[in-house]
Image (tube, grey):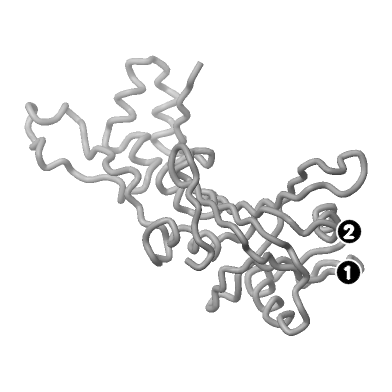
Amino acid sequence: VSSVSWPLPEGGAAADELHSSSTEDTLPSLLEEAGGLWKQSYPASAYREDATLGSGPAGRRPGQGATPSRMFSYRREGGGAAGRAGTARFLARHNTWGFVATRAAQGKIQGMPYGNCLLLSDGPVNNSTGIPFFYVTPKDNTVADLLKNPVASLTLPEADGNFCRKNVIDPEDPRCARLTLMGQMVTVPPKEVEFAKQAMFSRHPVVRKWPRSYEWFFMKMNIEHIWLQSWYGEVSAIAVEE
């Protein structure tokens, strides 16, 4: 059984109109009206008047306003290079967290895949490097795994930003891109610690106040492989040099 979920307004005339109308004949008309639920739930820029229909009864149903058009035509914020490499750089730059997968090195799950979400930054706001930095504690299971086996993958979902929400794309829809970086997670060397501090603290000021007793330190990923999925089906391999 499949279903369709419509985003509903929390209040106002449209909400009252919906609650007072419970028949199947009434709901479609609410969604089509210019001031109805559909138009109030989606960005105004997703609508345009269809000039080819005209304004008379022959060209448009009575009461029908602007129709949703080109719902997936938004540009990703921030500009940047086009294509898969540009999308990959965009996600590496703008994502503030990611899903890290490791091979468990302890307890009953030793040898099994283990995943965790970690805060990250690829540099200060005005200096993007494409290299993800992390502020971590050895008391975290993921970090304990990495200290024994540094091989890991890092998935950065586009759902972290506004693109999918503005385009009304479900986070699990492949058009809501996800970038996976694979490589070695290593401790940041002393000469790079100051940069790592600027990278993490400028994007995540709250981490400065985390309890010092947890022995925080900085790690980064040395990227070896890049995979991007931004459409249905297979993923695309992107050269690290790009």
Element class at badge 2: loop
Lower sequence index among marks 2 and 1: 2
Whether tag 2 and tag 1 are in contact, CB under 8 A, the answer is yes
Q: Residue 205: where, in percent of width, then height? A: 69, 71
In terms of secondary structure, where does tag 1 sit? Answer: loop
The picture quadrant where one finds residue 33 is top left
For the residue marked with disc 2, what is the amino acid?
Lys
State left or right for residue 21 relative to residue 190: left
> Going 69% across and 76% down the picture, which residue do you hit?
196
Query: Disc 2 versus disc 1: distance between alpha carbons?
Result: 8 Å
Q: Is residue 10 visible?
A: no
Locate residue 79, reporting x and y percent.
39, 65
Look at the image and tell me whether residue 188 can be seen: yes
Q: Which mark is residue 215?
A: 1
Badge 2 crowding class, 10 Å Cα cut-off, few under 14, some 14 to 19, many 20 or more, is few
Q: Residue at x 86, y 40 (%)?
A: 109
Dot 1: few (<14), some (14–19), or many (≥20) neighbours within 10 Å? few
Residue 215 image offset from top left, x and y in percent: 88, 69
Task: Say which residue label 2 marks.
Answer: 139
